Image: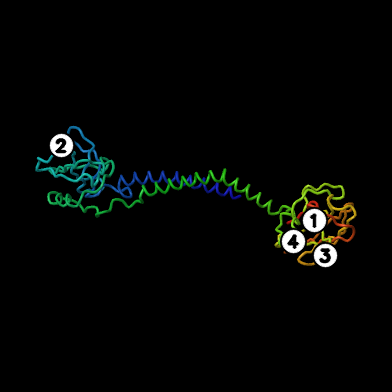
Amino acid sequence: MLANTVLTVGVVLAAAGIIGWITAAVLNRGAASGPRGRGPQPGEIWWATVPYRDGEGEKRRPALVLAGDGRSYTILKITSQDKSHRQDHLEIPTRTWDRRAAYNSFLDLSAPFQLNRLDFANRAGVVDPATWQQVAQRHRVGMPVPAGRTSSLPSGRLISWLSTLAFVLGLLAVCAGSTVMPWVSRVRHEMEVAATADVPLHDATVTASDQGGSGRSYDSTLNGAHFPDSTGFWVGCEGKPSVVTFALDGKYKRFTGTAGLDAVAPKDIVVKLVVEVDGKDTATVSVSRTASAPLDVDVTSARTLTLSAQRTKGTCANATRPYGAIGDALLHQT
């Protein structure tokens, strides 16, 4: 479920990025053509098709708009040729409307041209205030574009950047949804399985023991049955039981296993094993080398489990490991 959600979010983000790029391209084109698609305005510089003075031929060049009514416009042409020797030409800072320009341009003040709306291609920018003031002293002009107002459209560059970010995040989400998230789901499933799996008693924490070795894992044979994963317990032979206590911390429901005496125990010894849950006797069995006993104890919400073993018959002898063992001793979480 989570992987599908991440994958879906990734696809949506990637699609949003592509749509954003398209939108940015339209906005950038619209910004170049003039705010909200309106026509040329006084004080703006536009790329337009301007006829030659002699009337033969025309050239696409920048032009300064003086006035217009939406159909017909009065303009002054701009040239990149050096006209510093001419009194009827005014040097203007090109970089105010063309940042790529290396040199200033010259505005032809001699005579305006009349163009129609279709002669204009795209907007370049706005003329600087000082130039506009000089032009207004020599020609009739309309109201100029307010200073700093270049476009009422959202920034295409910002949208393009945000679109790229959305697209990259979308691709990462798609990758996560198709590869990482299934792996995370698999790990989580394994953890959930582990959380509900049976736990060997010897894996529980031993909180108290009067004999070293009690509560550890052993390979035991009980009454002829082999239990390679059993939990050992020492037997008290001096008039009192040997005790080992495990911490359960309320995590388990049942405790099961097969209690008996391992082959290291003397043949004639009999042992009483008492299982206590939170200090209360819950099960008592008698075991020997030829008699084992099943255990199935309710440990729901129990904090501790204690095994208490004492010899009731026979003679003890030296041993290198505990006499007693519980084969397949398991704590069940369900």
Marked residue nearer the N-terminal end (4 or 1): 4
Mark 1–mark 2 Cα distance, whole angstroms, equals 108 Å
Q: Earlier in the sequence, mark 3 or mark 4?
A: 4
Q: Which residue is mark 2?
A: 53
Q: Amino acid at mark 3?
A: Lys
In this orientation, does residue 63 appear?
A: yes
Look at label 1 and name its amino acid: Thr
Report the residue marked by disc 1: 256
Q: Secondary structure at mark 3?
A: loop
Q: Which residue is mark 3?
A: 240
Q: From mark 4 to mark 2, how far is it between C-alphas?
A: 112 Å
* In the image: residue 119, left or right of residue 91: right
Image location (x, y in percent) of residue 148: 26, 54
Q: Secondary structure at mark 2?
A: loop
Q: Quadrant of the C terminus?
A: bottom right
- Foreground label between 1 and 2: 1
Q: Position of residue 128 (x, y in %)?
A: 20, 50
Q: Residues within 10 Å of mark 2 (few under 14, many from 20)?
A: few
Q: Position of residue 226 (x, y in %)?
A: 82, 46
Residue beneath label 4, please?
209
Q: N-terminal of the two: label 4 or label 2? A: 2
Name the element at disc 1. Answer: strand
Question: Would you call the spot at circle 3 few (<14 residues within 10 Å), some (14-19), or many (20 or more)?
Answer: few
